[in-house]
Amino acid sequence: MKHRNDEPHSPLQRTRIASAAARIMAEDGIADFDKAKRKAARSLGLPETAELPDSAEVEAELRVYQRLFQGSDHDEELDYLRRKAIELMAVLSSFRPYLTGAVLDGTAGPHAEIDLQLFVDSSKEVEIFLLNHRIDYHPSTPRTERAEAVLTLYLDDVVCNLIIYAAQQERVAFKTRSGKVRPRARLDALKSLLTPPAGITKE
């Protein structure tokens, strides 16, 4: 007789999928929650009709996994990515960049990409700036209809996405698929998140 916890819509099954998706994101560097959830369900041998957890559930499991199994290694990698974001934001300061995504919220795993939001009158302004500064880039497909363009470049070994929006969108609070406001941070706020050098404590 099948136990009710084996049913495709049981709470336990959602938790199993969330846990497996979190492990996949942490170990394989997958940043897309939906992709990780589908891959997790397949790895557990579940049918396509299985109810998937929402992204907030996976994010909670991801934070637990990173704390338990990656610890200081994760902290060092996150700090490195944030410092790279600061470096790029300083170069792009005239475009009022904001950091968003996994590097900001602390869930960035191996091979994570830096996502910067820029709010300008035209994406051409950013392209001309990059060309004038001899910064190589290539256009990528926007993940949202709101974005006018996405320009992807490499900062040493890190992939960076410049997500360009119309200037008037800067006052709009963007939301995640779960309905939560998507966090974003300017340069000074990001600097406050850095781990201080050994022997120095934050005031």
Image (cartoon, rainbow, N blue to C red):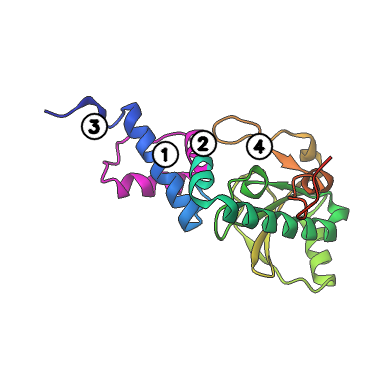
- Tag 4's secondary structure? loop
In front: label 3 or label 2: 2
In front: label 3 or label 4: 3
Q: Which residue is mark 4?
A: 182
The kind of residue tagged 2 is Ala
Instruction: Report if residue 51 is visible in the image.
Output: no
Q: Are marks 2 and 4 in contact (CB under 8 Å)?
A: no
Of the image marks 1 and 2, the number of the one nearer the N terminus: 1
The one nearer the camera, 66 or 59, is: 66
**Residue 128 position (above or below residue 97):** below
**Residue 152 position (above or below residue 103):** below
Q: CA distance from mark 2 to mark 4?
A: 16 Å
Q: Image quarter for residue 47?
A: top left
Q: Residues within 10 Å of mark 4 (few under 14, many from 20)?
A: some
Of the image marks 1 and 3, the number of the one nearer the N terminus: 3
- Tag 2's secondary structure? helix
- Name the residue at 65% across, 64% down: 158
In front: label 2 or label 4: 2
Q: Which residue is mark 2?
A: 60
Q: Which residue is mark 3?
A: 6
Of the image marks 4 and 1, the number of the one nearer the N terminus: 1
Is residue 46 magenta-colored? yes
Q: Which residue is mark 1?
A: 18
Of the image marks 3 and 4, the number of the one nearer the N terminus: 3
Q: Are marks 1 and 3 in contact (CB under 8 Å)?
A: no
- Name the residue at 80% across, 56% down: 89
Q: Are marks 3 and 2 in contact (CB under 8 Å)?
A: no
Which residues are the magenta region? 33-62
